[in-house]
Image (tube, grey):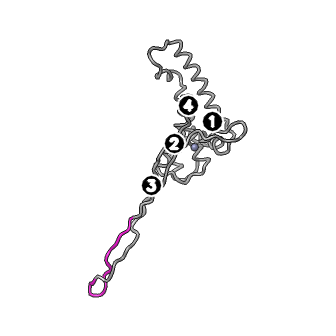
Amino acid sequence: MDLQNHHHNSLTIGMCLSEEQVIKTVMTRPKIGRGNRITGLITELYKVERHWQVTAILVLYGLPRLFTGSILAHEMMHAWLRLNGYTCLEPDVEEGICQVMAHMWLESETMAGSISSSSSSSSSSSKRRAKSEFEKKLGAYHKLLIEKNPSRVYGAGFRAAMAVVNRYGLRRTLEHIKRAEALP
Ligand SMILES: [Zn+2]
């Protein structure tokens, strides 16, 4: 995941590493000649299996909880796509759906009543409330960054994917993308 800064350079803040494994199974069988005599061996390619393995998810260290969480949600969506056979998506479709996941995670984290579960029992309730307000605003800010991102891949990709998810739901959208390798 890249973050566009104000100078239009980009900074990598998260990464999902994966590799494709191709397993070829070769079969050897005897070649039968005249009089049922074995005259040699036939070696042929029996089957080719391909699958993807996710080897690592990397996230830039030291960012606020909500920012780190949204990057993880984004990268985990990449991982899920790899592991479930979505391997030929256009960058704007893939990054768009990953940004939808980051946005949905932020949404769920900043919904009323969902924050402060991680606060320790020793902190006062007013402190906790202040943290909640702060996190709510920070979450809203990160959602806005995703929504207004000017990039064609991350921004326009997100807006197109979010519109479809709002209309059909995430599950149906993903099922369609699997079949068509594009948004409906
Ligand atoms: Zn990404």
Q: Could you tell me the amino acid type at mark 2?
A: Met
Query: Tag count in the figure?
Result: 4
Mark 1 Cα-neighbour bin, 10 Å: few <14, some 14–19, many ≥20: many
Q: Earlier in the sequence, mark 2 or mark 3?
A: 3
Alpha-carbon span between mark 4 and mark 2? 21 Å
| Label 3 within 8 A of ligand 1 by Cβ | no
Dot 2: what SS? helix
Mark 3 touches mark 1? (CB < 8 Å): no
Q: Could you tell me the amino acid type at mark 4?
A: Gly
Q: Main secondary structure of the magenta part?
A: strand
**Quarter holding residue 70:** top right
Of marks 4 and 3, the one in the foreground: 4
Q: Earlier in the sequence, mark 1 or mark 4?
A: 4
Q: Which residue is mark 4?
A: 62
What range of the chain is rendered magenta?
Answer: 25-37
Question: In the picture, which quadrant includes the N terminus?
Answer: top right
Alpha-carbon span between mark 3 and mark 1? 31 Å
Image x and y of residue 129, in percent: 54, 15
**Quarter holding residue 147:** top right
Residue 128, placed above or below residue 152 = above
Residue 51 badge: 3
Mark 3 Cα-neighbour bin, 10 Å: few <14, some 14–19, many ≥20: some
Q: Which residue is mark 2?
A: 77
| Residue farthest along the right direction in this orientation | 7
Alpha-carbon span between mark 4 and mark 3? 33 Å
Q: Earlier in the sequence, mark 3 or mark 1?
A: 3
Dot 3: what SS? strand
Image x and y of residue 25, in percent: 38, 65
Q: Earlier in the sequence, mark 4 or mark 3?
A: 3
Dot 1: what SS? helix
Image x and y of residue 14, in percent: 56, 40
